[in-house]
Image: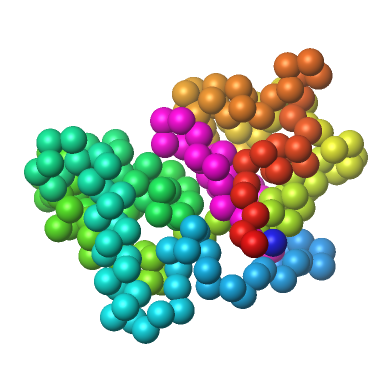
């Protein structure tokens, strides 16, 4: 099952929080699942249409997403909104990958704003190449199970904080607090990760 995530507030996606953790790649896991070969991913933004039709469709989607944050209607957006725009188009870059993308579209002398004319070709290429695709749900589950060798079905809050701050790409304080508020069951003070995965993804039918 290929899934894409329900966005959190402030532009973070629940699934993207896990992109920096030391999860094994699918090939490193026992009996890795077969990812759906359907190209209709990310809310339909990936397509099998001829290239020129696909590009025109991508341009339309990118423009619509960009305009939501173009508050001055001058074909620019605040650089801090770029991650939200990219994720709204069905892509799930890590923070490091997002920084690299922003570097591609920023001016030589950064102004704090991104121009549509620079954003459009870079984002079109990302969509055409199907980069930063969401992680399939079964891979997410096996990744959590790697962090839970006792197969309890949950991680404690302390364990989760440890993975978030000591392993992989470190989380900011804001990211960690938002992740914990969404993931931790207040009664047990733990994350029941099967329920959490179900909550944070939407199955593509």
Residue appearing at x 60%, y 22% in the figure: 181
Residues rendered magenta in the picture:
2-26
Residue 68 picture location, percent across and down:
27, 42
Q: Does residue 65 appear left or right of residue 39 in this picture?
A: left
Q: Quadrant of the C terminus?
A: bottom right
Farthest residue in the bottom direction? Answer: 50
Check residue 15 for magenta coloring: yes
Q: Is residue 128 left or right of residue 38?
A: left
Residue at figure coordinates x 26%, y 64% from the top left: 59
Q: In percent of the image, x 32 and y 68: which residue is there?
A: 57
Q: Position of residue 102 (x, y in %)?
A: 28, 49
- Looking at the image, residue 118 lies above or below residue 201: below
In x, y percent, where is residue 95?
43, 44
Tell whether 139 sits left or right of 187: left
User: Vertical placement of 137 versus 187: above or below?
Assistant: below
Classify residue 114 as left or right of residue 102: left
């Amino acid at each position: 099952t290929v899934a894409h995530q329900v966005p959190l507030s402030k532009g973070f996606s629940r699934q993207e929080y896990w992109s920096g953790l030391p999860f094994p790649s699918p090939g490193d896991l026992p009996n890795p699942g077969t990812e759906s070969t359907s190209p209709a991913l990310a809310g339909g933004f990936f397509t099998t249409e001829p290239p020129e039709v696909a590009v025109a469709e991508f341009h339309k989607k990118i423009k619509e997403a960009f305009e939501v944050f173009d508050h001055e209607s001058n074909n620019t957006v605040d650089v801090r909104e770029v991650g939200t725009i990219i994720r709204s188009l069905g892509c799930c870059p890590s923070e490091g990958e997002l920084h690299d993308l922003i570097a591609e579209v920023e001016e030589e002398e950064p102004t704090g704003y991104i121009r549509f004319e620079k954003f459009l070709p870079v984002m079109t290429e990302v969509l055409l190449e199907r980069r930063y695709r969401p992680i399939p749900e079964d891979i997410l589950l096996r990744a959590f199970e790697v962090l839970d060798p006792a197969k309890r079905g949950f991680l404690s809050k302390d364990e989760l904080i440890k993975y978030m701050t000591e392993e992989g790409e470190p989380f900011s304080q804001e990211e960690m607090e938002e992740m914990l508020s969404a993931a931790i069951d207040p009664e047990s003070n733990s994350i029941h990760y099967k329920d959490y995965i179900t909550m944070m993804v939407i199955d593509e039918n």
